[in-house]
Image (tube, rainbow, N blue to C red):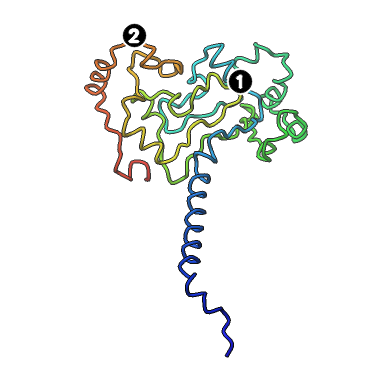
Amino acid sequence: MKTIFPKGIDKIKPVIFLTAGLTIVTIALIVNFYFTDKNLSVGYRPEQPIPFSHKLHAGEMGMDCRYCHINVEKSPHASVPHSDICWNCHSKVKTDSPKLELLASIQKDTIVKKNIVDHKFDKKAPKVIEELVENSKKGAAIPWIKIHKLPEYAYFDHSVHIRAGVSCVECHGRIDQMEVVKQVNSLSMGWCLDCHKDHEKHIRPDSVKITDLAWTWENSNLDKEAELKKIKETKNLNPPIMGCSACHR
């Protein structure tokens, strides 16, 4: 019977298996390195249904983040602003701006599908924009596109971190310098644990505004060692590192 493989094949078997093994390992390493939150999520910068400049509002005008994100100090979730919050100012300020045409129609509850589809700021936005939640008494909710997303199995409480002295900038970066908000950190489990392990560099004393995104220990005249000692004595911070149940409930 004629053999399928030549006699010399046995000598190169190790080379074949080694090459196949190295190829599999190389592919796995490439996938592990590139297909991660750091590479897939960081830099995510969707175009919102209404153009809103954090650089103008939070940066140049110095508006406090908590004016729009009203529940961030008392709720696990940092609420996104309803059209009413925007209209508190814009019913009197910049009322003739063409960029506010869509906001006006949302607030007056006269929004129709054509307004959304034809609006020049919405061409890259998802279909969800066509499905506004309307309320005849309060106007409609603005369908903001969520940027910072955690898996459903991960629990994160904004209010706990705010009370501990963790500023918005630690997770969201210099929002006050962004014309369009983007994700600057991976928000992966490893990233969170790194912060918990070395949390002292990420907290600030109560005497410093939590929404002062430009503040750092280095540019302050505070005695860092003394202030951290005071924080330890008053707040008893002990962020979980090993306990899974803290974040997976």
The residue positioned 27% from the left and 16% from the top of the image is: 227
- Residue in the image at 34% along x and 19% along y: 204
Q: Residue 247 placed where, x, y %?
A: 37, 41
Q: On screen, 2 above or below 126?
A: below
In depth, the one of 137 and 229 nearer the eye is 229
Q: What is the spatial separation of the Cα atoms under label 1 and label 2, in whole angstroms?
A: 31 Å
Residue carrying label 2: 221
Q: Residues within 10 Å of mark 1 (few under 14, many from 20)?
A: some
Relative placement, left or right, of 81 versus 99 is left
Residue 57 in picture, x, y percent from top left: 57, 16
Look at label 1 and name its amino acid: Ser
Where residue 87 appears, as percent x and y from the top left, is 62, 19
Asked whether 89 or 65 is in front, the reply is 65
Q: Which residue is mark 1?
A: 53
How busy is the neighbourhood of tag 2: few (under 14 within 10 Å), some, or many (20 plus)? few
Which quadrant would residue 5 be assigned to in this image? bottom right
Which SS class for mark 1?
A: loop
Q: Which one is in front in this view, the residue at disc 1 or the one at disc 2?
A: 2
In the depicted structure, whether residue 37 falls above or below residue 201? below
The answer to which quarter of the image holds residue 238 is top left
| Residue at x 25%, y 17% (from the top left corner) | 225
Quadrant that contains the C terminus? top left
